[in-house]
Amino acid sequence: MSAILLMAIGLGAFTVGYIFYSRFISERVFQLSSDFRTPAHTLEDGVDFVPTNRWVLWGHHFTSVAGAAPIVGPAIAVVWGWLPAFLWVTLGTVFFAGIHDAGALWASVRNEGKSIGALTEVVVGKRARSLFMIVIFLLLLMVNAVFAIIIAGLFVSFPSSVIPAWFVIGVAITIGYLLYRKGVPLLWPSIIGVALLYGSMFVGVALPLTLPETVLGLGAPSMWVLVLFAYAAVASLLPVWLLLQPRDYINGLQLFIGLGIFFLAVLLANPTVVAPAINASLPDDVPPMIPLLFVTIACGAISGFHGLVSSGTTSKQINNEQDVRFVGFLGTVGEGALALAAIIACTAGFATQVDWQSYYTSFASGGLLAFVQGGGGILAAGLGLPIEYGETLLAVMAILFAATTMDTGVRLQRYIVQEWGTIYDIPALTGKGLSTGLAVGSCLVLAFGAGGGAGTGGLVIWPLFGTTNQLLAGLTLLVLSVFLLKKGRPTIYTLAPMVFILAMTVFALLWQLRAFWELGSYFLVTLDVVILATTIWVALESLGALRKAREHAG
C-alpha cells in the first residue's frame, strides 16, 4: 500500500473534522461568545493571566499538548499492524480529542481559569476534587519524569540535536522581548526565528555535543536529566510571555514546517507501507491489542494531559472566547498529524517487511528509534537530505515537543501544589519557590529512585503512563458532561466518548494489574491500585452529580 494514500485519508479526515465537526460543537454545544470577558482580561497579572494573540497561543498549546507521546505511542502501537493504529488516531482525534481538549479549555475559561481539578469542586464536589487532583499530580509526575529521560536518551543517541534543542531558548526569549516589550509585529521575528532554528541544525550536525561518560558517578543520561529539570524549574517561574509562549510558538511553527517537509517527502518518495495491516506474527511479549491499543497510543488520539494544559495554562491566556475553537481543536488536529507522521515513518520508512520486523522484536522495542531512522530514510529518498540531517531534524522535533511539555508540566505541578496550599490553608505551599521545588524534587525522586538510580527510574512507570492518561481523559469528559448538563447543553457528544474511554482503560488497568503481580513488580501494583481506586471513586461521585443535575433539569 502507498503511504501517500494513508497520508491523504488521514489529513483529509482531520481537515473535514476541524471544518465541520468543530464548528458544530462550538456553536451547538459550547455556544462560544465573543462578548464574554475571559480570565486573561478579568484577572490579568502579566505573569500567568495574559491576553494572547491566538496564533501565539495556538503555538504554545499545540507544542505543550503534543510532547513525545504522540510519536512514541503510535510508534509502539504499529507492532499490532498499521491499520488499528491508523483508525484510532484518525477517529480518536476527530471525535474524542477535539471535544475533550476544547471542552476543558472552554469550561476553564468560564470558571476564572481554574484547572480541571479545581473545577471538579465547582461541578461535582470537594471530595471529588481532592481525589481528582491526586490522579492529576500522579500523571504530571509520570509525564515530567518520563519525558526528561526520553530527551536525555535522544541527546545521547543523537548528539547533533543538542545545539538546536538549546538554541531555541535564546530565540524564544528574543521573540518574547520584541513582541511584548518593543511591540514588534509578529511576522519578521517568526520568519527569522524559524530560519535560525533550522540553521542551527546544520551547526548541530557539524558540532555534535556529548557529555562525559561519567561525572561524580553519574552517567551522561543522568546528567542530562538533572540539567533538564534545573532548566524546567527556572522556566516555570518566568512570566509566560518571556519564554513559555514564544518558545512554544516558535516550536509550533518549526514543528508544523517539519511535518510539512516530512509529508512533502512522502509525496515525492511515494514509499510503500511494508508493515502488515494486521500483524499476525507478534513477538511473544506483546499484550492483547484490545484494550492495550488505546492506552499505548494515548496522546496520539486523546489525552488527559491535554485537559490539564487546556485548563492549566492555555485558559489563562485566551483573549476572546471564540479563540477556543481555533486553539483547542486546531491544536488537536496538529497532534493527530504528528501521530499520523509517526505511523507512516514507522511503517513505510524501511525497505522491506524484514527490515521493519528487525525494529519490532519485542513490545516497545521500536518507538522513537524507528521514527527517527525510518523518517530519516523517507526524507533522504524524497528530498535528498543527508541521512544525518534528516535524523537530526526528526530527533529535534521529538525533543522540542517533549521539552515544551516538560516546561508546561512543571508549571502545572507548581499550580497544583499552590492550589493544595490554598485549599488546605498552608501558606508556605502557595509561594512559587517552594511549590516549584516540591514539583521538581518529586520528579527527580521518581526519575532516579524508582528504577534504582542512573536516571532511568521514570521508565519503570511507563506502562502506567498511558492508562493514567486515558483515565484522566475519561474523567475530564465526565466532569465536562456534568457542567454541560447544568448549563442545559447537549451531553451525548461528551458522554459517548467518555463511556468508551473509561471502559477500555479500566479493562487495561486490570490487565496490567495482573501482569505486574505476575512479574513481581509490587511498586507498579501499588501505583496501579491507587490509580484504579481513585478513578472509580471520582467516577462514582461524578455520576452521582450527573444524575442529580439531570433530575434537576427534568
Image (tube, helix red, strand yellow):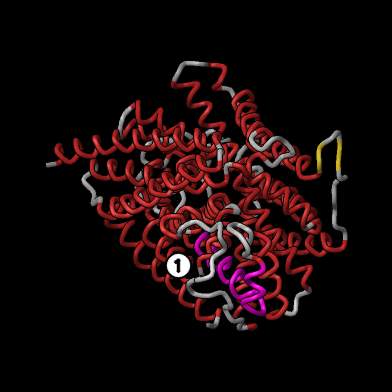
What residue span does the magenta drawing correspond to? 335-358
Q: Nearer the viewer, residue 499 or 357?
A: 357
Q: Position of residue 336 (x, y in %)?
A: 50, 62
Q: Position of residue 521 (x, y in %)?
A: 56, 38
Asked whether 345 falls inside the magenta stretch, the response is: yes
* Residue 179 in sight from this viewpoint: yes
Residue at point 56%, 57% (across, down) = 285
Count of number-bearing discs: 1
Task: Check the image and name the residue furthest to the left.
Answer: 554
Q: Nearer the viewer, residue 223 or 195?
A: 223
Residue at point 61%, 60% (across, down) = 362
Q: Position of residue 137 (x, y in %)?
A: 51, 34
- Identify the residue under disc 1: 84
Asked whether 552 falls inside the magenta stretch, the response is: no
Say whether residue 220 is left or right of residue 122: right
Q: Quadrant of the C terminus?
A: top left
* Residue 237 in sight from this viewpoint: no
Q: Is residue 308 above or below residue 202?
A: above
- For the residue marked with disc 1, what is the amino acid? Pro
Q: Secondary structure at mark 1?
A: helix
Q: Main secondary structure of the magenta part?
A: helix
Residue at point 35%, 37% (across, down) = 536
Other residues around mark 1 within 10 Å, as few (<14) / some (14–19) / many (≥20): some
Q: Position of residue 515 (x, y in %)?
A: 49, 45
